[in-house]
Amino acid sequence: MRDILKMLVVLSAICSISGFALSYLKMITAIPIEEQVLTYVQGPAIQKVFSDVDNSPVADRKKFTLSDGRTITLFPAIKNGRLTGVAMENSGKGFGGDIGVMTAFNPHNDTLLGIGITTMKETPGIGTVIFEPRFTDQFSGKDLKNVAPKAQGGSFDAISGATVSSVGAISAVSNATKDYLELKPEILNTWK
Amino acid sequence: MQPFLKEFTKGLWKELPPFRLVLGLCPVLAVTKSADNGLGMGAAVIFVLTLSNLIISLVRHIIPKKVRIACFIAISATLVVAVELLMQAYAYPLYQQLGIFVPLIVVNCLILGRAEAFAAKNPVPLAIADGLGMGMGFAMSLTFIGGLRELLGAGTLFGKYIMWEGFQPFAVMVEAPGAFLCLGLILCAMNAFNHWQARRKGQDAPENPMPGCESCRACSHGK
């Protein structure tokens, strides 16, 4: 009996000390990690979707709250003092987990400016073709009415052989579109 | 000082983890595409192994024997998650490169092996020496394999091109089979070197480990 009690106490003590130490560490590393993700994951994708800007979209980022309670970070692109685009990251289900997609919108005529893939765990050489221009280039300039794969009556081609990954990326864009349309009045109020 | 040095140096050659103890081969094969990756993984292992040895040696008298493995795993898992967080916060590109293999340090048998075989039976200073030595031996080996594979497979070392002009890289070396080839050749070279050294000293060549479980001598079967 005493043995069992001792085992319980020691193991629980070790686990709870670990838990406290890790939650403290998680708290103090949260801000540096966010910065690193911005620099190494979201930054390059943003640069890809906004080719010509005067400001730094990452530095000017702002958080918005959606009606269902989610908060989302938006990255504005400003050229000659005027808002030319706004980008946000959203995700869709891929073959090996969530696919993160940075989607940029043109708020003046409600079209897509372009997309950039941020994170994914797709099969190398198969699902990873969604990184290539032949997939990502088809988004720029399209309007927001038909954001779905062609098989579902939309206007975007899935890459054959990588249907699941393509559909995942397209659904990320379609999620972003919904959020964008909801936030549009607020966006236009925030940035001119 | 003498035993401290002895425990420290044994990990550097005599019991070099991947090539002598043949422990922790998963990262040895998986993350050594380049010298940089090998060094980064090695540094993470030095950190985890030294601290886990230190902590386990500190608490070795209060851990009940029956739950010792669970306790060791809880301690090393904590340290690995800490490394993962710190790596994400301060060395994100390395974290992206190493990916899944950082969390897998938890189940690296080197960590558990040293905890069970050494740290749980020895005082703190010796446990630290053992962890540092083994960790550095591991990091060295990883960097060496990584460097070799990078050099042959891409003609670069730590990202700098150093082979002669017109050198045709062996692409296979940076792919998965290259890791097996490299490891096999290195093990072969080390055995040949030991044989040669033993013969030079006039001793018998070191015997090959027996194929059965008798060769390990950890339990009564081996005696």
Image (cartoon, coloured by chain):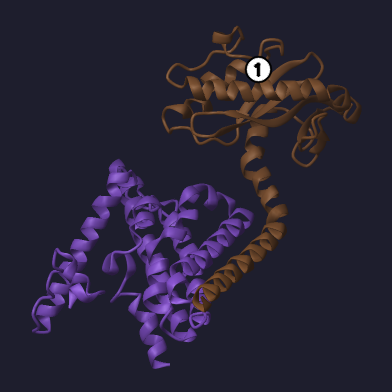
Residue assigned mark 1: A140
In the current view of this chain or complex, which residue is farthest to the front? A1
**Along the viewing direction, whichever of B131 and B42 lies nearer the viewer:** B131
Relative horizontal placement of residue A14, taking residue B108 as reference (left or right): right
Where residue B58 appears, as percent x and y from the top left, is 53, 81
| Vertical comparison of A118 with A18: above or below | above
**Quadrant the C terminus of chain B occupies:** bottom left
Residue B166: where, in percent of width, then height?
A: 30, 42
Question: Residue lying furthest bottom in this view?
Answer: B1
Q: For the point 65% across and 17% down, which residue is it?
A: A140
Q: Chain B is drawn in which colour?
A: purple
Taking depth in this image into account, of A7 and A23 the one nearest to the observer is: A7
Q: In this view, does A31 lie to the left or right of A184?
A: left
Residue B78 falls in which quadrant of the image?
A: bottom right
Visible residue check, residue A121? yes
- From what the image shows, is residue B150 above or below residue B109? above
Left or right of A177? Residue B162 is left
- The chain containing the residue under callout 1 comes to A
Local crowd size for mark 1, using a 10 Å CA cut-off: few (<14), some (14–19), many (≥20): some
Residue at 77% across, 35% down? A70
The answer to whether residue B167 is visible is no
How many numbered marks have been drawn onto this rendered protein structure?
A: 1
Residue B102 % position (x, y): 49, 55
Question: Which quarter of the rendering shows the N terminus of chain B?
Answer: bottom left
Q: In brown, which chain?
A: A
Q: Which of B47 and A115 is in front in this view?
A: B47
Residue at 19 percent across and 66 percent down: it is B213
Residue at image x 61%, y 57%? B85
Say what amino acid the circle numbered 1 marks: Ser
Q: Position of residue B109 (x, y in %)?
A: 38, 63
Instruction: Quadrant for residue A119, please give it.
Output: top right
Above-or-below relation of A31 to A120: below
